[in-house]
Structure formats: structure tokens, C-alpha cells
Image (tube, rainbow, N blue to C red):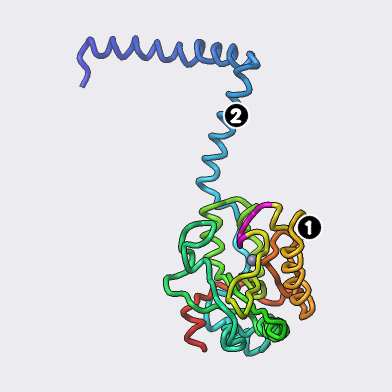
Amino acid sequence: MYNHIGVVATCSIWGFYTNLLTHFLPAMANKLINRSYIKQPLLLFFSTFLLLAANGQNPGYTHPPLTDKWDDYQQQVKKDSTKKMIELKTLIPGVIYDLRYASKNNFMKRVMYPVNTRLTYLRLPAAQALQKVQQDLNKKGYGLKIYDAYRPYAVTVKFWELVKDERYVANPSRGSGHNRGVAVDLTLVNLQTGKELDMGTGFDNFSDTAHHTFTNLSKEIQQNRELLKSTMSKYGFTPYTDEWWHYSIPNSGKFEILDIDFKKLKKDL
Ligand SMILES: [Zn+2]
């Protein structure tokens, strides 16, 4: 409800705002933008603002085709038995598990897998190759310790949502060897002491020191890495340049990206 003064006041305020919008602000903006010391921060401010606004809408990846239904997975296995997911201890009883994403002992300092995830899986050919690696190593007094193998796609998305940096986590657009059940993160243990061999860095260390090409390491560390690499390669695994612990089997394209949770796989054992 307007009284007289109110209308006059509104009119004069309206006039003031119109003036402000049509003359004063554009003139000010022009003046400001023409000063280069202000131009850059201003542009930076607006581009950051736009980027943040866009980020809110955009997850930063596109969904690849994936298998997330148990029946579809079973159909795929029926057609091609090499696609079966094998719980590693069923094939390699002596293998040691230290499933880092099932605990807080990982670079995220968060439990990324469902509580009580104690089993881990790989596709049949990768599991069989790993069995041979273990048998070979056992003869020399060593064994394998697994940090991670199959990782459901939903967990890769969770990593991405928390980190959004391709230096540390895989962009979900492509899916990873872990999602396909063909990649494994692992190290060597001494069978007598049960201790891990010194590899120079821990698991998920994202520095140059973890690269295979990094050689400023003690002779012992270099030999330990070489033993893991040569034995894994002997049975068909490919190393990953930037991570001494990550290996996968080649031609992984035929294995679908899976988003089947651990519980369902466990029921199938
Ligand atoms: Zn890995």
C-alpha cells in the first residue's frame, strides 16, 4: 500500500536507480576495466565465478557403458567364461590381503569400500596369472600382498567426486583397469618374516619416487622393484610407469566396466 510520500519516494528512488544503471555503472565499469591492474583480477574473478557455477552443474565426466546388473554380468560370463570374477584366495590360498580402501589406511583417509569388505576379485585370466606369479615367488622365499584389485565403478565415481584431479584419481569417463577387474595393486613380502619388502615408497605415493624410471634409490630397493616387475611381466602383466605397485593384463577392452558390488560377488562364491 502506497501513501503519497511513498509514491514520491519510490519515484525518486526509481529515477536514481535508472540513472545508476544507465549512466553511472557502465561509466564506472568502463573506467575500471580500462585500468589494466584492475582488468586482470576482474576477469579472473568472473571466470572463476563462471567456472564454479558450471562445476556445480557438471560432474566433470560422462558415464561410459558399464555392467551394473547381476543378470547382465552372468550372461556375459555364460558367453565368455574368462569374464568370471575370481576371489583371489580361492585360487591363491597363501596370498595376503591389506585392502587399503576397506580401511582408513589410504591417501583419502576414508573408508571407500563397504564396511567388512574382506575379499577381492580379478577376472579369471588375471587371477590365474597371479597364481603363477605367487608360485614362482614362493620358490624364492617371497609372496604377494594385495592392496587393491577389482574396484566397483561407483567407488571410482566417489573418488572423483572427492578429489576431481586426474593426477590422483581416474576420471570416471574412461573407467579403469580396476573397474574391469584386470588391474591389481600389490607388493612383495618376505615369507619368513611376513614383512613387506622395501619399495622406496608406500602404496599410493604420488611422487616421482614411485615411478619405475626413478633410479635414485638404494640397490636393495631397485632389486625389490625389479623382482616384482620381472615376475609380473613373466606371466603377462604390464607395469604402469608412474606406480611401482600397479599392474594389469593387456587387451582389457573386452572386459566390461563393472559396477557390481562386493556383496553380490561374494554370494556367487
Ligand atoms: Zn592401481
- Residue 213, label in figure: 1
| Residue highlighted by disc 2 | 44
Tell us which disc is closer to us: 1 or 2: 1
Look at 65% across and 52% down and name the residue there.
167
Q: Position of residue 168 (x, y in %)?
A: 62, 54
> What kind of residue is marked 2?
Leu
The answer to if 203 sits in the magenta stretch is yes
Q: Is residue 46 above or below residue 196?
A: above
Q: Is residue 126 visible?
A: yes
Q: CA distance from mark 1 to mark 2?
A: 38 Å
Q: Quarter-wise, where is residue 38 in the image?
A: top right
> Circle 1 sits in a helix, a strand or a loop, which is it?
loop
Outermost front residue? 192
Q: Is residue 72 above or below residue 240?
A: below
Q: Which residues are magenta?
A: 202-207
Look at 54% across and 45% down and name the residue there.
55
Locate residue 260 relative to residue 192 in the image: left or right: left
Figure quadrant of the N terminus:
top left
> Circle 2 sits in a helix, a strand or a loop, which is it?
helix
Instruction: Name the dominant secondary structure of the magenta segment.
Output: loop
Q: Position of residue 66 (x, y in %)?
A: 60, 71
Compare residues 52 and 264 and report the one nearer the observer: 264
Q: Quarter-wise, where is residue 84 in the image?
A: bottom right
> What kind of residue is marked 1?
Thr
Locate residue 263 relative to residue 256 in the image: left or right: left
